Amino acid sequence: MARFEPVLMRGIGERDLTDIETYKQLGGFDALEKALRQMTPEAVMNEVSGSNLRGRGGAGFPTGKKWSFLPKDGRPRYLVCNSDEAEPGTFKDRMLLEETPFQIIEGLLISAYAINAAQIFMYIRGEFLEGYRTFRRAVEAAALQGYVGKRILGTDFSMDIIVHRGAGAYICGEETAMLESLEGKRGEPRLKPPFPANAGLYGMPTVVNNVETVCCVPHIIERGARWFASIGPEKCPGPKIISVSGHVNRPGNYEVAMGIPARELIEEYAGGLFPGRRLKAIQPGGGSSAAIFEEDLDTGIDFDSLAAKRTMLGSGGFVVMDDTTCLVRASQTLARFFEHESCGQCTPCREGGQWVARMVSRLEAGEGSDNDIRILNTINNTITGTNLCPLGDSIMPFLASVLKRFPEEFAAHVKEAGCPFRPAHVHAGAAS
Amino acid sequence: MTPERERRASELAARYPQAKSALIPFLQYCQAQDGYVTQQAIRDAAEMAGITPSEAESIASFYTLLFKHPAGAHKIQVCRTLSCMLRGAEELQRHVRQRLGLASGETSPDGRFYYEEVECLAACDRAPCLQHNLEFHYDVTSQEFDRLLDEWRASEPAVSMPAE
């Protein structure tokens, strides 16, 4: 099967795209020139709307629609780029940041032009020190050549990029938590409405876009909405970077056409499973997503096909688990993640997350009971949908999906008073 | 505030429409100098942002990369989340705990090493991974860790949590 010709990852691994001249040789900044010289901001917005681009950060909201929500009331507008990638199993934005920073800058400038932003803020995850340094150097290099700053390319368009590094908090990837954090506060999600479009950063109209979303914009401007919309499913088209990890021969970031079947992604791109192993479960959209299984391998990797399977594309973190995986242990790892990352504002997330982590840890340590399993089977609806932000809604999907599909595996942990997958001496340390 | 800190505080505050946005970058700068976020740094940050020290402390306490107490100069943070777990993170963690004689969150008595098991570092394709003073190391086997540890033992980092 023919491989998808990369758009967003073009040149990565072959050329040094952190060098501005190399980026320009590959056509870099042509889209910015086109937008600023030949298009009005409305025309740029129409092009992006017409492309059906949907946000790549997790929620899949149509980008053009998000932009169109900004009120026309004369207040300054802000564009914030979400580079706080921390969803378990996702590592595409870090790659874009470290490998192709000028593509992000170009996308941000065109987006800022379209929405008539006063300022761009780049929020980079605290752990990404290298990406932060690379991106700051890139902004400086772009400014030296007149792509950032006053009167860009001699036009009336002026724009600066404020580069901000976080300090360690998964929750700041949630857009209102990110805005709080950018204002110098604790990264606690806000009650919505008002939405950021009306009251975002410093109370001003704000758009928050993910790094990969922003990277799509120059290509839409250069090659047209129709080209973009023709790739993959009509309602969620375009190129998509999937981060494949876990039990495959070639883990890595793969750029594919949206809608590629899961089987093809694993076999043609990621080199298939290890010899003699059988697929057990996949998290198709990061740690927050419900699992899919062997019988779902023909499902398309896109927002709508995965939603139809009661899971999600999310951030595109595709974690493959083979038959050597203990799903109680996997659930414990993720439950502990959400317990640790809850900001603590909402009781179902803060308390529920802790109790879920404790129950699953008990089961894995061989100290669980049938009652633990019974409770885990019933609390999905009391945790999910009862919190301010999606973090609380992310605690149960994976656990509920594997508990439903492999109930015997959970029961075996009770019956055998231990993990059937692990030697007995490991239990104590692993349960903490 | 020392004149140097005052200068840095003004520089950082000037980057943003509102000075308070510079709170975390300023604390990162102080931490890079002092090794952790000192009470003096909290007071200086509060002064810069125009808030009370207790509010500044509450904000600082929210973020895991701001250390509220002295911690080892070599900060070793090993990923413990799913993708790394599937590719041997638990074995690596056991090895690291044993080599350093530390549990997650502990600093060695000589103050040189700090060890922590952390959540997904976004390097899942090269698992298991770790960060040493925010620098990534990939595909870390036990042997590779021993090699790195020899290197770290022979050196003293100038800055353990770089700000810029």
Image (cartoon, rainbow, N blue to C red):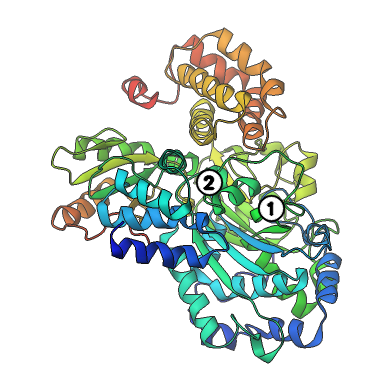
Side of A12 where A157 appears, left or right: right
Quarter of the image that includes the N terminus of chain B: bottom left
In space, the residues marked 2 and 1 are separated at their CA atoms by 14 Å
Vertical side of B104 occupied by A364: above or below: above
Q: Do labels 2 and 1 share a chain?
A: yes
Position above or below: A397 against A404 = below
Residue A381 at what x, y percent from top left?
Answer: 72, 22
Going from N to C along the chain, the mark reached first, 2 or 1, is 2
Q: Say which of B11 and A418 sits in front.
A: B11
Is residue A18 something that shows in the picture?
no
In screen coordinates, is A171 left or right of A364? right
Parent chain of label 1: A
Q: Where is residue A160 in the image (x, y as percent from the top left)?
A: 59, 74
Q: What is the residue that sits farthest to the bottom in this orientation?
A: A154
Q: Residue A185 carries which label?
A: 2
The local secondary structure at tag 2 comes to: loop
Residue at position x 52%, y 56% in the image = B21
